[in-house]
């Protein structure tokens, strides 16, 4: 393939520090209005800094240009299809940004006396109630900042629950298909991970589960599960799994990353789960922001409630004046705080706006459409070249996502999943999640979400078909891809072996 | 679409969910609403909050009512920054990755430490994350924390330490500053890290270098929480022996948002780079030798290392860190220093002005940068209620977290708090204290403050 450098490629990356010129600036600050006392008279000079930090010196128009240029070097959900499995890249309604920016939300100090923050506390309480209904569990804490934070919370709750019963259990079971955050959270919470195998239908291998529990039931603290699992399949044995874990005395934890499949269809609480985290930045439309912010509220069963983090938003009956809302710090069995103040409130505003917009029926319909879209795309990709080169890992109806294996493609065309992913970039698509879950060789995990049209799903299927056809002729094209992106394939090994993590000044 | 799938109905696709587990009824939530209706509902809730637009906000305690320049919103609201996922495909994420690299450079400059990550959730959980790093680095399990560390940080550290199987030992304050002798006595050969905050929760600038000597002697890491807005004028933790400098990033480019989302920053010495939590952007080359950026050192992270990861964090606060970077670029080198000086001078003025009010005395006279603590000769909550009636959030009641300072009030200054507002605060505090004491004398203390509900 002839390599002509695109204009964006020709423009080499320069950081804002490299555009800095001494004496330039953007900010005009207010006058101090108070005596210009030398600082050394106010603070001992040994505690003062000799030179200000070398921040860039640059005027506002150039700052705007710089970051606008950078923005054009990003691909984003608003620019095109983003079927990143397990990440639920659904449309981010702009209404949510507008309501989050209202001064009553955006400029509300977190330490404001609850009686002067009743609107915020009511909103949090309403969101708690909504998530409680969606999850089928009676109590909610909004405090965790993201899914992994919710997992850690859930494991600490599990620890507190067992400790309160005079038990010290050490093992947390998790399928080999679980998200990496699961085992990492287990370690941080001081437990040991025990892997459970996956069966030929993509669910928990029941014999293995029984064996792992049977080794020492008194040591089973918890089982962490995603349902539908990371293969996009609902585990039909969930009731039996729950019974086995509860019989052994453990808790059942639901990783809510895949909740988008089951909203209004089936509830983790009804499946037997004790603790659920909800990724508001997945199912509830908080924009991902290029890696956050998110929020990871947890919903829990009655027996876990006493241990929920402090403070908890509560509704108080306010004799005759209607309800009032407060922050309950008096929770003697609480695991304590997981972070500062009350959580990522701005995210709560957006997600509550989303829930209000869709309503109960709308949420159920969103899950229906997400599942329909995933199955349609799966069917499209089962036909044509993809059907042979990229077979479905587990052939049954999927939920909101599905996993293909690039193993035949690699064997027959010499094209790795990574090559296919990189070639997709040239076709204007964000690739699916690749090489996860680990048990599928050359995995591609595809989650289209409900906010995509049939046309965009067809376009993606056609791009996959075109890349495979191209590779039959010349696989080298995809192996060297991408060509049209701001930079071409990057040396990630170098960045880890000899890390350069800041601009030298 | 169903025909292509080979299914008769959407319901058939859900048949994999066993019947008893199907909800079988609509969710008990209100029906969906139009955009206009949702807006009105949320605007009505927002109207029931007394925000910093309605009250002159002298409350700090870790989050501050700074002016966030318009350019920050303009850039962070761009779709290209707002709507992508974590940059797993670096070829199409150069904008976000480069912004992270620039942010890391800025935080490294601010703190005087060579390595920064791309941000964590917020301040207090960053403290707990530093503890996890310190355990791995020292193979020890004991943390010594100053009572000047933000109460939320101390409590978060306690929460996490149960999981870590570690012990937390607290060292008290003396005259507003960490008790140096008590600290030296508390640090031993089992101590993984010593945690200080400067300025501390009471606003006092700590003598970090002196206090940190005990950590150095015992081979413990020195972790310093700091307020980034003060680092234009205060000596950076890296120049005072800190192994890790971290903190709440909200003052930089982020709204109050009733507590979040903001971000935590986390900087360390080179030695700790492979134990760092969170994402780190790194520079590299593409196949043609062009400069580019990727997520570096991913081998630390949960998606690769699973149970052996240095941390469990995945989604963090990338957009909030971008806001901070834009704010810092807007302030620039000189502006950032000037803002720091402005805060110090106005705070000195406010401390003198408020401290001179009858019924008010300084809680300590240690040097401060942007926040100071006083004692009130009247019930703090009632004084705050009276100030609220005059459109003022007068400060943070220290008794919430420090029983020993039941009469304490923490007052914070930003560039938005004008001299006129400071004067009005002094006047309001004086009037409130006088009124309270007047009522006390008149024995009419049964009256309760107006409930806003």
Image (tube, coloured by chain):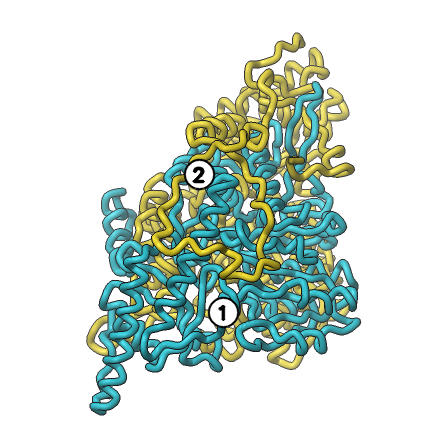
Name the spot of residue B195 as percent of width and height, x first. Answer: 64, 66
Instruction: Left or right? Give the position of A54 relative to B436.
Output: right
Q: Is residue B145 above or below residue B104?
A: below
Label 1: how many Cα within 10 Å (few below 14, some 14–19, many 20+) = many
Q: Which mark is residue B202?
A: 1
- Mark 2, secondary structure of its residue: helix
Looking at the rendered image, the disc whose residue lies closer to the viewer, 2 or 1, is 1
Q: Is any part of residue B224 visible from this angle? A: yes
Quadrant of the drawing holding the N terminus of chain B: top left
How far apart are the two marked residues, 2 and 1, measured between alpha carbons? 33 Å
- Mark 1, secondary structure of its residue: loop
Instruction: Left or right? Give the position of B332 relative to B447.
Output: right
Q: Which mark is residue B76?
A: 2
Q: Is any part of residue A397 visible from this angle? A: no
Q: A329 or B14, which is in the foreground?
A: A329
Q: Which chain is cyan?
A: B
Circles 2 and 1 on the same chain: yes
Name the spot of residue B91 as percent of width and height, x first. Answer: 61, 27
Q: Is residue A7 above or below residue B272?
A: above
The first of marks 2 and 1 along the sequence is 2
Q: Chain of mark 1?
A: B
Residue at figure coordinates x 66%, y 40% from the top left = A436
Name the spot of residue A371 as percent of width and height, x first. Answer: 48, 40
Chain A: what color?
yellow
Q: Quadrant of residue A165?
A: bottom right
Q: B183 or B140, which is in the foreground?
A: B183
Q: Quadrant of residue A149?
A: bottom right
């Amino acid at each position: 393939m002839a390599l002509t450098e695109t204009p964006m490629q020709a423009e080499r990356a320069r950081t804002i520090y490299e555009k800095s010129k001494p004496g330039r600036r953007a900010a005009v600050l207010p006058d101090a209005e108070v005596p210009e006392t030398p600082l050394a008279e106010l603070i001992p000079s040994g505690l003062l800094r000799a030179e200000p930090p070398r921040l860039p010196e640059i005027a506002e128009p150039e700052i705007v240009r710089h970051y606008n240029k950078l923005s054009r070097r990003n691909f984003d959900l608003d620019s095109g299809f983003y079927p990143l499995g397990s990440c639920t890249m659904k449309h981010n309604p702009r209404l949510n940004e507008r309501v989050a920016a209202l001064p009553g939300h955006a400029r509300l100090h977190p330490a404001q006396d609850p009686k002067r923050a009743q609107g915020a506390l009511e909103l949090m309480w309403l969101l708690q109630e909504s998530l409680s209904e969606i999850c089928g569990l009676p109590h909610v804490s909004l405090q965790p900042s993201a899914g992994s934070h919710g997992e850690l919370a859930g494991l600490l709750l599990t620890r507190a629950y067992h400790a309160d019963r005079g038990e010290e259990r050490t093992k947390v079971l998790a399928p080999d298909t679980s998200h990496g955050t699961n085992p990492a959270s287990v370690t941080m919470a001081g437990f040991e991970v025990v892997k459970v195998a996956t069966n030929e239908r993509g669910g928990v291998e029941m014999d293995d589960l029984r064996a792992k529990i049977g080794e020492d039931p008194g040591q089973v603290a918890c089982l962490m599960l995603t349902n539908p699992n990371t293969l996009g399949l609902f585990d039909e044995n969930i009731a039996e799994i729950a019974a086995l874990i509860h019989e052994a005395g453990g808790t059942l934890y639901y990783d809510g990353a895949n909740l988008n499949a089951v909203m209004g269809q089936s509830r983790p609480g009804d499946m037997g789960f004790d603790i659920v985290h909800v990724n508001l930045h997945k199912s509830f439309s908080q924009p991902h922001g290029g890696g956050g912010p998110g929020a990871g509220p947890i919903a829990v069963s009655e027996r876990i409630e006493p241990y929920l983090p402090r403070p908890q938003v509560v509704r108080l009956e306010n004799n005759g004046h209607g309800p009032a809302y407060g922050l309950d710090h008096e929770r003697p069995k609480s695991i304590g705080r997981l972070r500062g103040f009350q959580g990522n409130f701005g995210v709560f505003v957006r997600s509550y706006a989303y829930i209000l917009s869709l309503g109960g029926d709308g949420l159920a319909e969103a899950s229906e459409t997400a599942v329909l879209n995933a199955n349609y795309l799966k069917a499209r990709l089962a036909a044509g070249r993809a059907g042979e080169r990229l077979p479905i890992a587990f052939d049954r109806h999927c939920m909101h996502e599905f996993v293909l294996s690039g193993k035949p493609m690699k064997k027959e065309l010499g094209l790795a999943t990574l090559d296919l992913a990189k070639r997709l970039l040239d076709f204007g698509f964000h690739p699916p999640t690749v090489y996860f879950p680990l048990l599928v060789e050359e995995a591609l995990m595809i989650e289209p979400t409900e906010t995509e049209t049939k046309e965009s799903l067809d376009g993606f299927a056609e791009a996959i078909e075109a890349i495979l056809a191209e590779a039959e002729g010349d696989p080298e094209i995809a192996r060297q891809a991408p060509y049209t992106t701001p930079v071409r394939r990057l040396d990630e090994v170098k960045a880890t072996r000899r890390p350069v993590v800041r601009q030298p000044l | 679409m169903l025909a292509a799938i080979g299914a008769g109905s959407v319901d058939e696709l859900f048949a994999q969910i066993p019947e008893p587990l199907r909800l079988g009824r609509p969710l008990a939530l209100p029906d969906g609403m139009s955009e206009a209706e949702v807006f009105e509902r949320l605007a009505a809730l927002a109207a029931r909050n007394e925000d910093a637009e309605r009250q002159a906000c002298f409350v700090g305690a870790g989050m501050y009512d700074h002016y966030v320049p318009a350019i920050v919103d303009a850039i962070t609201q761009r779709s290209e920054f707002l709507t992508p996922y974590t940059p797993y495909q670096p070829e199409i994420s150069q904008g976000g990755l480069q912004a992270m690299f620039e942010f890391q450079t800025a935080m490294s400059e601010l703190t005087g430490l060579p390595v920064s990550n791309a941000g964590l959730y917020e301040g207090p959980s960053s403290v707990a994350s530093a503890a996890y790093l310190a355990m791995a680095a020292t193979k020890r399990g004991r943390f010594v924390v100053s009572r000047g560390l933000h109460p939320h940080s101390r409590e978060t550290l306690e929460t996490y330490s149960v999981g870590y199987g570690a012990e937390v030992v607290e060292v008290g304050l003396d005259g507003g500053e960490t008790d140096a002798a008590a600290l030296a006595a508390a640090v031993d050969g089992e101590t993984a890290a010593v945690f200080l905050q400067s300025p501390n929760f009471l606003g006092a600038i700590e003598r970090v270098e002196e206090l940190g000597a005990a950590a150095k002697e015992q081979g413990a890491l020195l972790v310093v929480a700091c307020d980034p807005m003060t680092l234009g004028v205060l000596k950076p933790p890296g120049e005072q022996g800190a192994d890790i400098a971290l903190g709440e990033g909200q003052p930089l480019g982020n709204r109050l948002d009733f507590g979040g989302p903001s971000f935590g920053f986390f900087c360390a010495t080179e030695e700790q780079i492979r134990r760092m939590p969170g994402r780190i952007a790194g520079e590299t080359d593409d196949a043609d030798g062009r400069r580019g950026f990727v997520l570096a050192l991913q081998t630390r992270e949960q998606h690769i290392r699973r149970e052996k990861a240095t941390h469990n964090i995945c989604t963090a606060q990338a957009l909030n860190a971008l806001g901070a970077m834009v704010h810092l670029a807007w302030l620039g080198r000189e502006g950032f220093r000037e803002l720091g000086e402005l805060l110090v001078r106005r705070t000195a003025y406010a401390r003198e002005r408020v401290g001179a009010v009858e019924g008010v005395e300084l809680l300590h006279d240690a040097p401060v940068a942007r926040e100071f603590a006083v004692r009130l000769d009247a019930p703090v909550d009632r004084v705050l209620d009276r100030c609220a009636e005059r459109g003022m959030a007068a400060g943070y009641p220290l008794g919430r977290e420090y029983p020993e300072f039941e009469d304490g009030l923490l007052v914070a200054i930003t560039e938005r708090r004008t001299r006129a507002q400071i004067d009005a605060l002094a006047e309001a505090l004086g009037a409130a204290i006088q009124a309270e004491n007047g009522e006390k004398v008149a024995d009419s203390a049964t009256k309760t403050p107006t409930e806003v509900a």
